[in-house]
């Protein structure tokens, strides 16, 4: 198995892997489901606390989950690239948090990855990859997800996402996610992840859930203000079959102070 990503990571998002056209979730924390032909995409996520200062960055934790499936139960296409624009109210802070190098995570199972880089752990969750080999029934392969701080340099923040699949296929996957500042109207952060093929194109991520924590080594990886009662994120996903998919998520916040 080759490298891949299972999440869309950073400010106010980590939400949908994709949706064709534009799907907007305003208001509460209910999941968003979009159906395009046979493809069904469901996304959910949010942050805590909801009450944020209008002017001062407030530490937040992020939760997200997503599911991709075909209505007829067939194997879904694999996502190959994720580009995320996050609300300019939010910020990513990893300076001062211990760092981990990609090489420390390669060819390691979950226990070994934690042993090598536990101090750099900023988030965790789980995922399922579906692998469909020719003339065989698709196989669902679960894994724990670990998100590590790779550090800040030259205006770029790097995160490493580790997964280890052990049965019936095995291997460690380490994905690199880059985060940079990005001025584009409402948005202020750009997150980019390129997803190589899984098992030569036979694998697809079908679900994930993830939480980015507060108070890691006395620091807070993600924070935000709330100036107008909402936080917004735009996600573009590109699939193996050429489909381009976009999702827009809006979550409410309460301004204080």
Image (cartoon, rainbow, N blue to C red):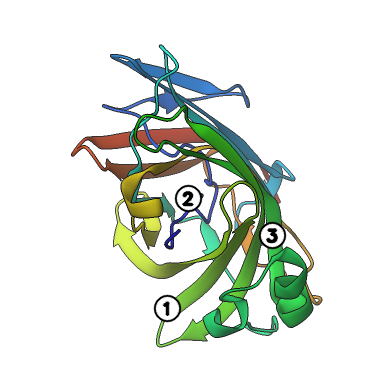
Q: Earlier in the sequence, mark 2 or mark 1?
A: 2
Q: Are marks 1 and 3 in contact (CB under 8 Å)?
A: no
What percent of the width, then of the height, locates residue 231?
Answer: 51, 42
Answer whether residue 28 is visible to the viewer in this image. Answer: yes
Q: Which of the 4 image quadrants contains residue 163? A: bottom right
Q: Earlier in the sequence, mark 3 or mark 2?
A: 2
What percent of the width, then of the height, locates residue 126?
Answer: 67, 46
Check disc 2 and report the residue beneath it: 8
- 1 vs 3, front mark: 3
Number of callouts: 3
What percent of the width, then of the height, locates residue 67?
Answer: 52, 30
Q: Nearer the viewer, residue 171 or 61?
A: 171
Q: CA distance from mark 2 to mark 1?
A: 17 Å
Check disc 3 and report the residue beneath it: 123
Return the residue found at the far bottom.
154
Residue 156 image label: 1
Report the side of 25 relative to 166 (left or right). Answer: left
Return the residue found at the far front.
135
What percent of the width, then of the height, locates residue 221?
Answer: 65, 67
- 2 vs 1, front mark: 2
Answer whether residue 208 is visible to the viewer in this image. Answer: no
Dot 2 crowding, Cα within 10 Å, few <14, some 14–19, many 20+: many
Eyeballing the image, is 252 above or below 27? below
Q: CA distance from mark 1 to mark 3?
A: 19 Å
Q: Secondary structure at mark 3?
A: strand
Q: Nearer the viewer, residue 191 or 53?
A: 191
Q: Nearer the viewer, residue 229 or 123?
A: 123
* Residue at image coords 80%, 77%: 217
């Amino acid at each position: 198995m080759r490298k891949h990503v299972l999440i869309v990571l950073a400010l106010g998002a980590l939400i949908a892997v994709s949706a064709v056209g534009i799907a907007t979730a305003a208001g509460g924390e209910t999941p968003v489901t979009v159906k395009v032909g046979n493809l069904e995409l469901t996304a959910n996520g949010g942050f805590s606390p909801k009450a944020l200062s209008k002017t001062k960055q407030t530490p937040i934790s992020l939760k997200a989950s997503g599911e991709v499936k075909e209505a007829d139960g067939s194997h879904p296409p694999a996502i190959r690239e994720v580009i995320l624009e996050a609300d300019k109210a939010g910020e990513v802070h990893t300076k001062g948090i211990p760092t981990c190098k990609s090489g420390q995570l390669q060819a390691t199972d979950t226990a070994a990855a934690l042993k090598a880089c536990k101090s750099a752990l900023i988030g965790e969750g789980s995922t399922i990859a579906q692998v469909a080999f020719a003339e065989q029934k698709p196989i669902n392969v679960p894994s724990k997800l670990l998100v590590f701080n790779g550090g800040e340099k030259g205006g770029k923040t790097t995160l490493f996402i580790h997964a280890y699949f052990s049965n019936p296929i095995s291997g460690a996957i380490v994905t690199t996610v880059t985060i940079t500042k990005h001025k584009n109207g409402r948005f202020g952060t750009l997150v980019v992840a390129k997803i190589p093929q899984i098992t030569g194109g036979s694998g697809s991520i079908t679900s994930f859930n993830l939480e980015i924590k507060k108070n890691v080594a006395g620091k807070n990886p993600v924070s935000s203000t709330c100036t107008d009662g909402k936080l917004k994120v735009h996600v573009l996903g590109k699939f193996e079959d050429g489909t381009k998919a976009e999702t827009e998520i809006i979550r409410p916040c309460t301004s204080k102070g």
